[in-house]
Amino acid sequence: MDTTNTGTEQKTGRRLMQVIFASSLGTLIEWYDFYIYGALAPIIAKQFFPSENPTAAFLAALATFAAGFIVRPFGALVFGRLGDLVGRKYTFLVTLLLMGFSTFAIGFVPGYATIGAAAPFIILALRFIQGLALGGEYGGAATYVAEHAPKERRGYFTSFIQTTATLGLLLSLSVILLTKKLAGDVAFNDWAWRVPFWASFIMVLVSVYIRLRMSESPVFAKIKKEGKVSSNPLKESFSKKANLKMVLLALFGAVMGQGVVWYTGQFYAQTFIERTCGVEFEQTRYLMLGAIVLATGFFVFFGWLSDRVGRKWIMLAGMLLALLTYRPIYRSIYSAATDQSSSLVVARSGSSTKVSVASNGDSTIIQKSVQAFEGGNTYQTVVTKTVKAQSSAPSKIETVKTVWLSKGHFWTILFLVFIQILYVTMVYGPIAAFLVELFPTRIRYTSMSLPYHIGNGIFGGLTPLIATRLFDLSKTSTQPAGDPFVGLWYPIVIAAVCFVIGLLFLPSKIDEQVDD
Amino acid sequence: MAASGYAVILINAELDKDFLIQLKKSDMENIKRFSGIIWIGSALLAMYLLLAQAAHEFAQSPTLDTRIFWFTIIPVFLPIALGLLLFGWYCLKGEYEGEQG
């Protein structure tokens, strides 16, 4: 008898691991597809959106923000509805195929120089499809895993889905760096940037094959058999007060705060280190990759912990810590990146000026100065002045500052980014289980997907844009350099509001029944 | 006699405890209800600030970046502010009473 039970348990455990693997792999690939566009945005902009054409530049911004983030809630509605009508398995197969197709196709679109204005429009359309597909994917995967998982380990099992966004970012950066290394800089900028898009095709094929072999969620299959499937999930989700109030609570009491904490830790940190502090491109990537690798395991840890102490308090603790410590953390990052307290190493410091005159008489003056500090950072400032011979317009001056961090400062900043990503794991690790438990099976896919994608796509996704905007607004005649920390008020205020709403209204008990 | 007196004290203590729990619960419900005013106020303030800032920036010959920013922000955040307004209204009406806080 015992042997039979153990055998059955092993079989169930193996089956569950297959479910998690199939769901997580597909979601990871979708994140990979989504991120390679962002990581290759400067090259894509050059190929498809020439800056001298204002319409193309406008489309470029739209492709990055609107299609990338704002379209996601629409994807949540379209595919959430489908998932609640026909089932989770087929819907997240469709989103995976759509994402795979659009990503693969981006790799084949001829550039602006070949087909002209059609190029940016095709890219924009494909990016829209990417956004829609991503909007439909997450809810399906989270629901599918949660509806398979035993009630006492739901947080733990769904936390594997939560790692995929971070691992997708890691995979995209790795594939890009590898392709660049193999092809070389010139070939990469010319054509090899398309390779990461083509690589997606193979990954999607593998994932579709695995997912096709999976069966429908048992909870959904049960309600379908009993004829309890919702005939109009959109109407039921958003026009019935009992459910709409939970959608609003999920958004304002959990997901909006989680979204800003996530995007501040994983994306705004990078923008701040690279643009505001001027830390060199590769060092910035290594900082982010190092912190992500160190913190990823904590998604699973906090998912596991949420099965024991509840979802609410872990998520709220993450938000509270974030809003209280963001400013000190960013001040420490800034002071580590701008530290000039040690003595100057004269042998490694100096300045030079280079003047070149073009055949049309235009001249370019490049002034380069380097300051290296004993056991500290190295700072380089390059001022490029362009004077037009045929024009009375004032000369164009461009200043680029680059910092190479010392070992000590590198590790200090890596630790500070790690802390932020740890907050991300606290707020994001338990959220899938939390959202699944908040809504009934018949409208779960629709109801949880919309607040998730408004919180993450809009509140979170627009964090770098809004924070940078606040920074620009802080530049005045009395303070021309601006306040480098002013952008942090956006995530702090949103997280604070979310924390208070969550504290007052979120259920602290785990809802054990997800088959209702 | 002494035993029955002790039992009375115990019953009274239980009643006091229940009363305190009830009082605490109703305090919580009141806080939840009145927080609705804060959410409604926040939503209205957010709407006003969004529109006022956009109008201010558009009045000063906007650059392409400014236009892109506001054409992205306004259509996205105004409906969300309406959602917060509705959330506040539900709080005020006591729709979230009975939810575990």
Image (tube, coloured by chain):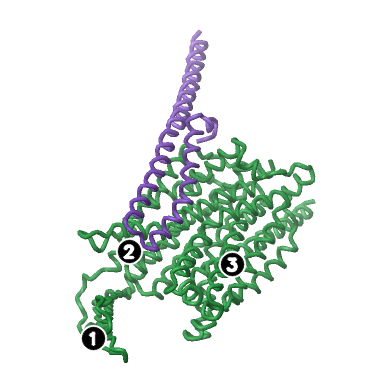
Chain colours: A green, B purple
- Subunit of label 1: A
- Identify the subunit bearing mark 2: A
Label 3: which secondary element: helix
Give the vertical position of A502 relative to A302 (above or below). Answer: above
Residue A111: percent from left, percent from top: 54, 78
Q: Residue at x 68, y 70 (%)?
A: A206
Residue B2 left/right relative to A131? left
Graded by Cα atoms within 10 Å as few (under 14), some (14 to 19) or many (20 or more), the crowding at tag 1 reads few
Q: Is residue A459 above or below residue A408?
A: above
At label 3, counting other C-alpha atoms closer than 10 Å, the crowd grade (few under 14, some 14-19, many 20 or more) is many
- Residue type at mark 3 is Leu
- Label 1: state its secondary structure: strand
Q: Which amino acid, by three-letter code, is at mark 2?
A: Ile
Mark 3, mark 1: which one is toward the viewer? 3
Work out whether disc 3 and disc 1 sit on a shared chain: yes
**Contact flag, marks 3 and 1 (Cβ < 8 Å):** no
Q: Give the residue at mark 2.
A: A333
Q: Which residue is mark 3?
A: A126
The residue where tag 1 is placed is: A353
The reply to whether dot 2 and dot 3 touch (C-beta < 8 Å) is no
